[in-house]
Image: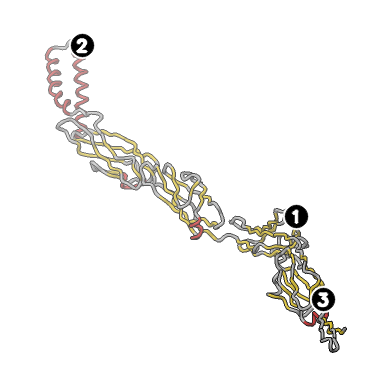
Amino acid sequence: MSVCFFLRKIWLYQKFITFTHSIIEKTKIGMKNKLLLFYIFIFLSPLLSSASCPGDTARFNTNAPKCISDSVNFTDVSTINGGDAIINWNWNFGDPASGSNNTSNLQHPAHLYSAGNQSFNVKLVVTWNLGCKDSITIGVGIQNLVVTNAGTDVISCDNNLIVNLMGSVLNAGGGSWSGSGTFSNNTSLTPIYTPTSTAKANGMDTVVFTSFSSPYCPNVSDTVLIIFNPGPTVNVGADFSVCKDTSGVPLSSTITGATSGRWYSLGVEGTFADSSLNVTTYFPSNADTAAGSVILYRESIGNGICLATRDSLTVTFTALPTVIVKTEDSSCSGSPIVLDVTVSTGAGTWSSSGTGIFLPNSTTLNGLYYPSPADNLAGIVTLKFVSSNNGGCQSVFDTLDVIIKHVKMVMWYSPMHLRLLVLSLIGPGLSEI
């Protein structure tokens, strides 16, 4: 303080002397006074020259802007006249929230800022050995930490085709998504994500959201877990056939993971007894039967967050079976009856009113029938063929009465004796002539 006071007095004296010298010159005072003032001025001039305070002396560098997690380093680069020295550094970091750490007297200090996303005015005041001071203030920018949020974990269903994602990012230019599936736009905050079938089968998927273009702080990531619950299931059974003359098609289904369901068809004018019931009846239209088939669907309702599921079956309408027995309507006794039948279903079974046998079996369409002795004696047997594999229709049949003709037998005796001609007919017995 005394040095500064002394320098200030010298400065005032210099002004006074200069002013006085000017007055003396103007008033033409004697040479003696002139010399006195001149000597005083000469004596004080060296002191004034060495004690003058230069301006623009304080200087410092910094490695800012920085992330709030990193300390900012300050480097003093102040300059002074040769022979003088800076003896004090007074730093104020413009961060009062940091308390006592807001100031420092070090030449090259460091400071960890208490807040980010703002600029702090840092002031350096330097003092050198002559007591003069200079100051400089520079703004320092601090960035807050990057924060990414991929959203809360998502509950989805394994039958959902897509998953809607929602992320957010602070203190960075944006974010990008990555995962095993595909994204509608991987740099959008709200992309549409299409998971893989493998992820659905595994029951879960992990998606990562990572920030980019952070100026000074590190980029960071966040993850979201997608849980795939089983979706609704619908089962209507296998395809089947019914006859064209059916009055109604019985239907049955099971549904899990949904509250109910509905039946519907792509046919024309067909109706359901109650389309909401698992077990119901479908009444086909003439157009359905004429087309030969109709596809019936059962779709789940009340699926929660899942998509609806459906199952289908095809009902085929088969034509009415036809049977035509073409066997000869007469046969000789003792001979097999050759069977001949035409059936639209390609299958069926023979039977008879008698006690004969079918060879090789009764389901052979064009086999043989061997009448029994009782059949021969009766002289007639009724053959019947009944269709099978009727495709949902009632079986049909055709019959034929076959007349069994008797064979005459003649016996000759020697002319010398009584000749007896016997006509033998198989079945009824013998007749004599």
Q: Are marks 3 and 2 in contact (CB under 8 Å)?
A: no
Q: Nearer the viewer, residue 404 or 264?
A: 404
Q: Amino acid at mark 1?
A: Ala
Q: Position of residue 433 (x, y in %)?
A: 88, 83
Q: Nearer the viewer, residue 419 or 330?
A: 419
Residue 39 vs residue 186: left or right? left
Task: Provide the residue designation for mark 3.
Answer: 405
First in sequence, mark 1 or 2: give its number: 2
Task: Provide the residue designation for mark 2.
Answer: 26
First in sequence, mark 3 or 2: give its number: 2
Q: Amino acid at mark 3?
A: Lys
Mark on residue 368?
A: none
Residue 6 higher or lower than 425, as above or below: above
Task: Provide the residue designation for mark 1.
Answer: 290
How many residues crowd around disc 1 within 10 Å: few (fewer than 14), some, or many (20 or more)? few
User: Which-is-in-front pick, marks 1 and 2?
Assistant: 1
Q: Amino acid at mark 2?
A: Lys
How many residues crowd around disc 2 within 10 Å: few (fewer than 14), some, or many (20 or more)? few
Q: Position of residue 19 (x, y in %)?
A: 22, 18
Dot 1 lies on which element? helix
For the point 68% across and 63% down, the residue is: 240
Q: Position of residue 190 (x, y in %)?
A: 51, 46
Q: CA distance from mark 3 to mark 2?
A: 182 Å
Question: Which quadrant is the N terminus positioned in?
Answer: top left
For the point 48% across and 57% down, the residue is: 198
For the point 14% across and 21% down, the residue is: 40
Quadrant location of residue 34?
top left
